[in-house]
Image (cartoon, rainbow, N blue to C red):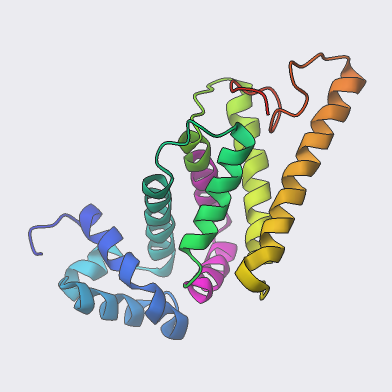
């Protein structure tokens, strides 16, 4: 694999890192073990992934790409169902990598700008997978709110020992329901008449829920 670019090497190596991260953390040891497993020259892997922040950034980007592939066409679902499926699928894909996620969050806590950027990127990935094409004010508010919902749900999921992560799914449903109730109240207080006050996360360009 010596003909690969550094951009091509990153997702290959980080995809193999989580089992090693659980023991060695996001660092050189886990990277070199993953490189050996995937047939990547360790020196090239070091150039592609020189530090923990770069590794976590690449890993979250790889997870976003995996999510897009897994979701496919969600055209038959209502918008609330699409967003819920996107969050649930992201967590399901990481179900065997919880320790790697936990350690990644520790790295992101030390790099707040990176943490903000990766969270925004994931929220944007979910909205785009759901079919969102907004470019106005709603583009930003929807991603900010979904980012808050996802990050809160992620923290619950990290410590969830219920069967099938039932507690996490229940928490996610409550958060979504809470946003819907807020939108109803806002519509009444401001006198806004929405075609359907149950539209997820405000005025969306999708069929009503």
Q: Quadrant of the N terminus?
A: bottom left
From the top left corner, tell me how far across and down residue 123 is, in percent: 55, 43
Depicted 192 relative to depicted 87: above or below: above
Q: Which residues are magenta?
A: 97-124
124 or 82, which is in the foreground? 82
Depicted 165 relative to depicted 7: above or below: below
From the top left corner, tell me how far across and down residue 40 is, in percent: 17, 70
Furthest residue toward front: 76
Would you say 10 lies left or right of 175 here?
left
Q: Please indicate, yes or no, whether residue 100 appears anywhere in the rendered image.
A: yes
Going 38% across and 64% down the picture, which residue do you hit? 55
Quadrant of the rendered image containing residue 145: top right
Depicted 197 relative to depicted 41: above or below: above
From the top left corner, tell me how far across and down residue 12 is, in percent: 26, 63
196 or 48, which is in the foreground? 196
Question: Is 103 inside the magenta-drawn segment?
Answer: yes
Furthest residue toward left: 3
Would you say 77 lies left or right of 23 here?
right
Going 83% across and 15% down the picture, which residue do you hit? 192
Would you say 81 lies left or right of 192 here?
left
Depicted 136 relative to depicted 57: above or below: above
Quadrant of the rendered image containing residue 152: bottom right
* Total numbered circles: 0
Question: Is 113 inside the magenta-drawn segment?
Answer: yes
Q: Quadrant of the C terminus?
A: top right
């Amino acid at each position: 694999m010596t003909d690969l670019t550094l951009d091509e090497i990153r997702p290959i190596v980080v995809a193999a890192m989580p089992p090693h991260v659980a023991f060695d953390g996001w660092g050189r040891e886990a990277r070199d073990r993953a490189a050996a497993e995937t047939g990547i020259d360790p020196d090239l892997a070091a150039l592609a992934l020189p530090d923990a922040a770069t590794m976590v950034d690449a890993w979250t980007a790889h997870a976003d790409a995996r999510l897009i592939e897994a979701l496919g066409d969600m055209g038959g679902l209502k918008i609330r169902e699409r967003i819920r499926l996107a969050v649930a699928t992201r967590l399901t894909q990481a179900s065997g990598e919880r320790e790697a996620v936990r350690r990644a969050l520790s790295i992101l806590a030390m790099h707040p700008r990176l943490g903000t950027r990766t969270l925004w990127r994931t929220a944007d990935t979910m909205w785009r997978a759901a079919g969102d094409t907004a470019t106005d004010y709603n583009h930003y508010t929807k991603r900010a709110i979904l980012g808050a919902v996802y990050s809160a749900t992620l923290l619950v999921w990290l410590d969830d020992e219920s069967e099938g992560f039932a507690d996490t799914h229940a928490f996610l449903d409550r958060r979504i329901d809470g946003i819907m109730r807020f939108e109803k109240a806002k519509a009444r207080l401001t006198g806004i008449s929405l075609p359907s006050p149950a539209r997820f996360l405000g005025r969306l360009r999708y069929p009503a829920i």
